[in-house]
Amino acid sequence: MTAPIQKPAAGAPLAAVVMGVAGSGKSVVGMALAEALHCKIVEGDQLHPPENVERMASGLPLNDEYREGWLEAVGRAIASHAARGEGVVAACSALKRGYRDRLRAHWPGLVFIYLMIDKNRARERVATRRGHFMPASLIDSQFADLEPPTDEEGAIFLDATRPVEELVAAAAAKLAAKAAVEG
């Protein structure tokens, strides 16, 4: 059973997660969106414990158990900023509905921005990036775990193949529209 989606409290700061599989552009879009909206950024990759990073770097995917503590760390970081009245944008895969519910448990009303990308494009992007622990060989496992947001979740859906500037502008406009409707 999934948790009901709650609307943010009136006057609550923006709290959003840029989500998607590896290679969708979560970090780049998340950082640019946070900068554009004058928000704090939570980079989910930096919150993985060393054993998760080692596991992925060796080509082994994470399961729910490995992701549990990491999701808690991401959720706590989001809630910490938001509780201080700071707008916050997090970059986090949030692949499954249960993962998103877990993050929402830390801050009700959290908005998810889903960067949609196909498997081949994600694999190409991951294969060409430098200095990251996630190998392209894990793309299949990311798509196997992916549960795209449902309509009930109220996520913002964006085409990850668009230029970063377009994605940021679209996300900012859709976040503003959501805030106007829900606020």
Image (cartoon, rainbow, N blue to C red):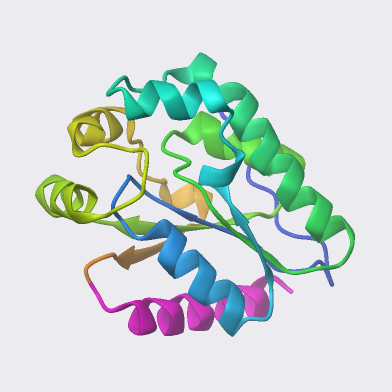
Q: Residue furthest left?
A: 120
Estimate the x, y position of residue 151 in percent, counting from the top left. Answer: 43, 51
Magenta span: chief secondary structure: helix
Q: Is residue 152 above or below residue 95?
A: below
Identify which residue is drawn at 65% across, 54% down: 110
Estimate the x, y position of residue 170 in percent, counting from the top left. Answer: 41, 80
Q: Which residues are magenta?
A: 162-183
Residue 171 among magenta residues: yes
Identify which residue is drawn at 70% across, 49% down: 6
Residue 86 appears in the figure: yes
Estimate the x, y position of residue 164 in percent, counting from the top left. Answer: 35, 77
Residue toward you, 66 or 148: 66
Q: Is residue 101 above or below residue 131?
A: above
Q: Which quarter of the figure is the C terminus placed in?
A: bottom right
Residue toward you, 143 or 183: 143
| Residue 157 sits in quarter | bottom left
Identify which residue is drawn at 80% across, 58% down: 81
Residue 107 appears in the figure: no
Residue toward you, 42 or 15: 42
Q: Which quarter of the figure is the N terminus placed in?
A: top right
Residue toward you, 1 or 68: 68
Q: Is residue 118 above or below residue 98?
A: below
Q: Residue furthest right?
A: 84
| Residue 69 sits in quarter | top right
Residue 180 among magenta residues: yes
Identify which residue is drawn at 48% across, 35% down: 97
Q: Is residue 108 left or right of residue 121?
A: right
Q: Is residue 102 above or below residue 150?
A: above
Q: Residue furthest top?
A: 65
